[in-house]
Image: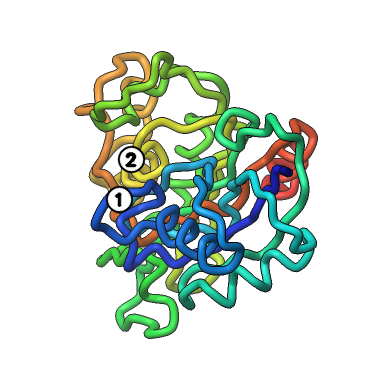
């Protein structure tokens, strides 16, 4: 038996999130079916992040324990032969038998993308969220840094049955950029995230850019810890899990690259 870590990319549009749910199409469920079909093993694939319905990933990390004789570097090929086009295994490597991706990760990089153009781009419209009217990107950029550092982020968490014991998190970077005339991208790198945290953060920054919320309300919300003091929960289509980190050095390097 050996433990194998996978990196998985997926278009979450047609999935009810990552986590297995009986009778529903989920990324975890489809992966486990692919393992059964390709390797003949019925087993659990453990993921790092339980992305919501409609959320995408470029670098989701997961792992499973297998008795297969298929070489590790060939596992992506054999699994992709069983997987649908909207889910792909991009890499595989052997890890220790006690490796648990959810608990061994030290941080994640998400990005959220708003589309502010008049006419949708048919080739990317599934991976952005539309916003109409003028948006002050500079105001968003100036406000974003107020989220950086260690804070109690209770105000950025929607209610969930699996509420976190601690709501204190450390955000290494919150950066707002405009990579195209009609795109606004928010990159967030942190040690861990609360339920809907990046989507609420993105909705709050958008409202500041629209002039519907003052930048100083971010500090007020962090002090109050009240969800009502932050903005809307942005739609899932604009959110992507870009990368999962398993070393502090990799996390810090990514934050530094994005900052530059």
Q: Of residues 55 and 88, which is closer to you in this image? A: 88
The residue shown at (49%, 42%) is 49
Quadrant of the frame with the N terminus: top right
Residue 111 circle label: none
Q: How many labels sit on residues?
A: 2
Q: Is residue 165 above or below residue 41?
A: above
x%, y% of residue 70? 75, 63
Closer to the chain start, of discs 1 and 2, is 2
Q: Of residues 153 and 183, which is closer to you in this image? A: 153
Q: Is residue 176 among the parts visible in the rendering?
A: no
Label 2 neighbour load within 10 Å: few <14, some 14-19, many 20+: many
Using the rendered view, name the quadrant where residue 154 is placed.
top left
What SS does tag 2 mark?
helix
Q: Residue furthest left?
A: 228
Q: Of residues 122 and 15, which is closer to you in this image? A: 15
Q: Left or right: 17 with respect to 39? A: left
The residue shown at (77%, 59%) is 72
Gap in angstroms between the C-alphas marked 1 and 2 = 6 Å
Residue 200 circle label: 2
Are the residues at dot 1 and dot 2 in contact (C-beta closer than 8 Å)?
A: yes
x%, y% of residue 8? 58, 59
What SS does tag 1 mark?
loop
Label 1 neighbour load within 10 Å: few <14, some 14-19, many 20+: many
Q: Is residue 229 above or below residue 211?
A: above
Q: Is residue 170 among the parts visible in the rendering?
A: yes
The residue shown at (33%, 40%) is 200
x%, y% of residue 6? 65, 53
Residue with the mark numbered 1:
234
The residue shown at (34%, 62%) is 15
């Amino acid at each position: 038996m050996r433990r194998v870590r996978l990196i998985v990319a997926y278009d979450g549009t047609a999935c009810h999130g990552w986590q297995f749910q009986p009778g529903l199409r989920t990324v975890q469920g489809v992966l486990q079916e692919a393992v059964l079909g390709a390797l003949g093993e019925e087993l659990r694939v453990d993921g790092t992040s339980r992305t919501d319905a409609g959320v995408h990933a470029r670098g989701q990390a997961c792992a499973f324990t297998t008795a297969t004789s298929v070489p590790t570097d060939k596992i992506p090929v054999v699994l992709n032969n069983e997987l649908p086009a909207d889910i792909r295994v991009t890499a595989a490597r052997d890890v220790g038998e006690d490796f648990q991706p959810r608990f061994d990760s030290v941080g994640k990089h998400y990005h959220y993308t708003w589309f502010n153009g008049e006419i949708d781009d048919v080739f990317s419209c599934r991976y952005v969220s539309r916003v109409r009217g003028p948006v002050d990107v500079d105001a968003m950029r100036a406000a974003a840094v107020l989220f950086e550092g260690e804070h109690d982020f209770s105000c950025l968490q929607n209610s969930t049955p699996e509420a976190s014991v601690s709501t204190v998190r450390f955000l290494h970077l919150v950066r707002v950029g405009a990579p195209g005339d009609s795109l606004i991208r928010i990159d967030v790198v942190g040690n861990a995230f609360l339920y809907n945290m990046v989507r609420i953060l993105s909705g709050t920054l958008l409202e500041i850019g629209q002039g519907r919320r003052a930048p100083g309300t971010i500090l007020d919300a962090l002090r109050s810890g009240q969800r009502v003091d932050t903005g809307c929960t942005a739609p899932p289509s604009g959110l992507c899990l870009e990368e999962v980190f398993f070393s502090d050095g990799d996390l810090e390097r990514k934050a530094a690259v994005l900052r530059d």
